[in-house]
Image (cartoon, rainbow, N blue to C red):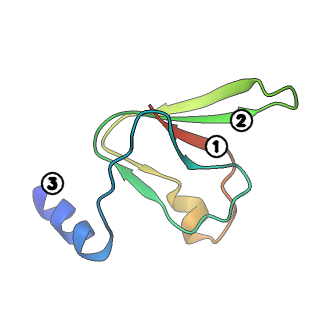
Amino acid sequence: MKDYLELLSSVGKLKKFQKNSILFYEGEEAKKFFILLKGKIRIYKSTASDKEITLHYFNPPNFIAEMPAFKKLNYPANAVFE
């Protein structure tokens, strides 16, 4: 795993997020993907009345939003670091 992370760090950058930081919003152009090493990410959608509906939780190690980024799509939901 350490060798893999070193390889990824040569082409990407390590970023630490504070609790409740938004990684991306639904509808934004997916210009990057994330690799979760610590913490938890919640994927959710917002209703017209601003209610949040949780779709999924990601725990480490995990890839987040790689498919929209590789296919040059928009993010299909919101993501927050918890």
- The residue that mark 1 highlights is 78
Q: Does residue 57 lie above or below 38 as drawn? A: above
Mark 1: which amino acid? Asn
- Identify residue type, mark 2: Lys
Give the left or right position of residue 48, taking residue 25 as reference: right
71 or 23, which is in the foreground? 23
Measured in 3D between alpha carbons, the distance from the residue under mark 2 to the one under mark 3, in whole angstroms, is 32 Å
Does 44 appear above or below 73?
above
Depth check, mark 2 against mark 3: the one in front is 2
- Give the mark, 2 or 3, whose residue is nearer the N terminus: 3
Q: Which residue is mark 3?
A: 1
Q: Residue at x 11, y 57 (%)?
A: 2
Q: Residues within 10 Å of mark 2 (few under 14, many from 20)?
A: some
- The circle on residue 45 is 2
Amino acid at dot 3: Met
Question: Which comes before the other along the chain, label 1 or label 2?
Answer: 2
Contact between labelled residues 2 and 1, with CB atoms less than 8 Å apart: yes
- Name which quarter of the figure residue 56 lies in: top right
3 or 1: mark nearer the eye: 1
> In the image, residue 60 lies at what x, y percent?
32, 39
Q: Secondary structure at mark 3?
A: loop
Quadrant housing the C terminus: top left
* Position in image of residue 80 (x %, y %): 53, 38
